[in-house]
Amino acid sequence: MARIVMKFGGTSVADIDRIKNVARRVKREVEAGHQIAVVVSAMSGVTNRLVGWCNQMAALPDPREYDTVVATGEQVTVGLLAIGLQELGLDARSWCGWQVPIRSDGVHGKARIDSIDTTRMVAAMQAGQVAVVAGFQAVGPEERISTLGRGGSDTSAVALAAALGADRCDIYTDVDGVYTTDPRIVAKARKLDRITYEEMLELASVGAKVLQTRSVEMAMKHRVRVQVLSSFEDKPGTLVCDEDEIVEQELVSGIAYSRDETKVTLTRVPDRPGIAAAIFGPLAEAAVNVDMIVQNVSEDGRFTDLTFTIPHPDLERTRQVLEAARGDLGYERLVADADVVKVSVIGVGMRSHPGIAQKMFQTLASEGINIQVISTSEIKVSVLIAEKYTELALRALHTAYGLDAA
């Protein structure tokens, strides 16, 4: 008998028929003899509607009351699913975040989980009860409802699996696994049977939207085996696991892309010690996430053009921060370009095989695609290119690294 956490996202519980479908899936696992906890999101579109109501009431709603409102979507879903399971003859009970309790810090709207007390839940599961848990929500230090930010139900599920000592966390979604790249763009993309935590984390961080980044971080930290499956088809998914579980590792496992990038260039910045800290320090304080950075120093060494990338929604905030500091920084112009895309090649095989980056650069050059910025990590090479070349770049790289399906 295994202990399994099953998580279903908004599209999987979008209406009553789909919630009934989830109940039937859960029943199959229970009948197989497993102890089951189910984590669910709000029904598709509900959270957006709740957020909209908050914004209609106030331009900047009180974060504590905002969380009180938006957390109600999950409360509806857990109740409905518990009723559905009971109708199938199962003993089931709904749990809100505060009832478990799942305790978080006090940062409303994007809280982080501090602890989960599963004592009562484990006793109920051992007695044969299915626990239906509201994702996305927790309880803060002042006993106020808190929420974990968009995509937080994935984090709820992995954290609960870790706390329960679950054998696996199955995340059901509208895709049937993790692919070598976006199959909507590259028809020859292959579904992966297994992928390492590190590779999945890199894929999630650079644009692959299968799993939320924080959930992968937590899975890697606590060594929770995560399986990505389709809610609508009965077929094997992709297992996210430790590198030791993968017998033969590909050099490159996947190619991801992110269109949510803006390139910012500060021209003729005085090249002096501390200038980078003076630029990026205030941006960090303003919660702007800077990613790729490149610097071009003038021939006389007095000035530099500093280029970096940020998430597109942060552009106006970046402008405000840097304009306010322009007198101290002394740059000439701020130039922004949103017509760019970040393309990343990812694989743990890069650690021991040279030439991965060179192949990427040669492939793009052969297609006439200019590279604007480059960044690397131990298992990833990312480049910034013009957005219009996205599809061409993905297809060419997918073929070059031998990832095309037969």
Image (spheres, helix red, strand yellow):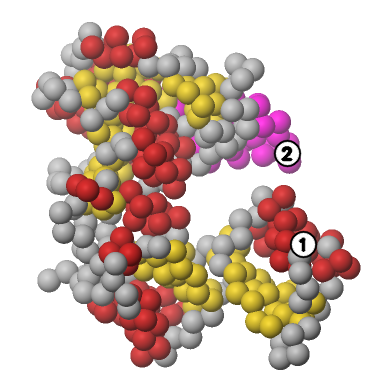
Answer few, some or many: residues within 10 Å of disc 2's Cα (few below 14, many 20 plus, some between 14 and 19): few
**Residue 219 image-quadrant placement:** top left
Q: Secondary structure at mark 2?
A: loop
Percent x, y for residue 152?
Answer: 46, 37
Amino acid found under the numbered disc labelled 2: Leu
Q: Residue at x 61, y 60 (%)?
A: 290
Q: Residue at x 70, y 34 (%)?
A: 61
Q: Which residue is mark 1?
A: 278
Q: Answer yes or no: is residue 340 visible.
A: yes
Residue lying furthest right: 327
Q: Is residue 229 above or below residue 371?
A: above
Labelled disc at residue 60: 2
Q: Secondary structure at mark 1?
A: helix
Q: Which residues are magenta?
A: 47-76
Which tag, 1 or 2, sits closer to the chain's start?
2
Q: Quadrant of the N terminus?
A: top left
Q: Quadrant of the C terminus?
A: bottom left
Magenta stretch containing residue 71, yes or no?
yes
Magenta stretch containing residue 343, yes or no?
no
**Residue 68 image-quadrant placement:** top right
Q: Residue at x 27, y 39 (%)?
A: 225
Q: Answer yes or no: is residue 256 visible.
A: no
Instruction: Say whether residue 292 is left or right of residue 1.
Output: right
Q: Distance of mark 1 from mark 2, alpha carbons?
A: 29 Å
Q: Main secondary structure of the magenta part?
A: helix
